[in-house]
Image (cartoon, rainbow, N blue to C red):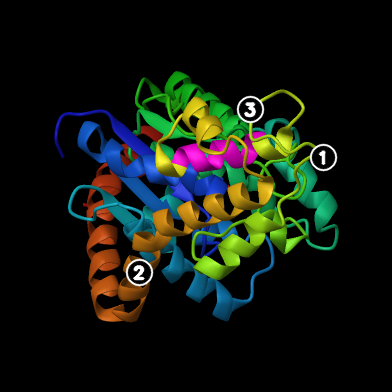
Amino acid sequence: MEDKKLIFSGIQPTGTFTLGNYIGAVRNWGPLQDEYNCIYCVVDMHAITVRQDPVKLRQNTLNSYALLMACGIDVEKSILFIQSHVKTHAELNWILCCNTQFGELSRMTQFKDKSQKHPDDINAGLFTYPSLMAADILAYNADLVPVGVDQKQHLELARNIAQRFNQRYGDFFTVPEPYIAEIGAKVMSLQEPTKKMSKSDENPNACILILDDKDTIIRKCKRAVTDSEAEVVYREGKDGINNLMTIYSSVTGKDFAAIEAEFAGKGYGDFKIAVGEAVADHLEPVRSEFARLIQDKAYLKECYTAGAEKALRYSQRVLNKVYRKVGFVDKG
Ligand code: TRP
């Protein structure tokens, strides 16, 4: 690989992204590929820390892979693979588990939240989830990890694990830094615009999925919660309108002043339809590229097989050195 900084990120195999994931993160990954070496992985092994339907997991993993490609991740420029295809992640995880403290894992808020949500299945994998995430990152000695706020604590733990290993065994791992994107607006729920847009929202109208068709997108925008005024202006207290303006701005490139001028004297109804149409048109190329890719299973397989080979070659070298450092006998 070229001599550039290395970015690593893992993506849960949910099969689709929300408009919020897309605007806030995923669509910025394509342009990063020129400036950095990028490695992206669909984390099916993390997914099974909560109960999954095997048929759906397989489908969602492939869908996520194809969707990342459709969103601009170029398998020639970046390494894009499926986590369970690259055995070094599980192998390094074991070493890192032995360098992670029970107390550290117990303090993870995601573990506490998920334990509460699934009290009948607080499994050891859920507990050691952050060690596997650290293994994902450290197996490539990544410099930078793009993470949202919900993953900051896990990244902090990965840094601590790397530092502890380096202290015990001599400097080896790169201590990864969070990568904070300069661009990328935060998109809120269409139904409760003070909350982040989330796929797990019970109200399906709260959230636009990037594979939603045009009619669905327009319908969800039409039902978006606004306020009792009738002015399309960005102002404190107008959370719903502010959110729709943010979305409209993100997909059209127009700034708020231009949007206010465009809709001066028009009602919310017109504005909502315009937002829906702009979003749907913006997502159309992603949707059609996804449809093309997901039909071509042979090509997809070629891509993820090649991605896994590259990832294995890279991470195996790192793992071999780790094995030596901890005192395992060379297998020759
Ligand atoms: N835990 C991350 C999430 O839920 C996914 C993930 C797994 C990840 N391994 C990673 C993210 C490594 C960044 C780096 O979103």
Residue plotted at (42% across, 70% down): 62
Say above or below: 16 vs 164: below
Residue at numbered disc 1: 228
Asked whether residue 167 appears in the rendered view, the answer is: yes
Q: What residue would you read off at disc 2?
A: 288
Residue found at x 74% / y 55% = 201
The N terminus sits in image quarter? top left
Of labels 3 and 1, earlier in sequence is 1
User: Which one is in front in this view, the residue at disc 3 or the one at disc 2?
Assistant: 3
Residue 100 picture location, percent across and down: 60, 34
Q: Amino acid at mark 2?
A: Ser
> x and y percent of residue 275 in the render?
54, 50
User: What is the number of the mark on residue 234?
Assistant: 3
Q: Left or right: 289 with respect to 43?
A: left
Q: From which residue to which does the magenta span run?
A: 242-250
Q: Is residue 103 magenta?
A: no
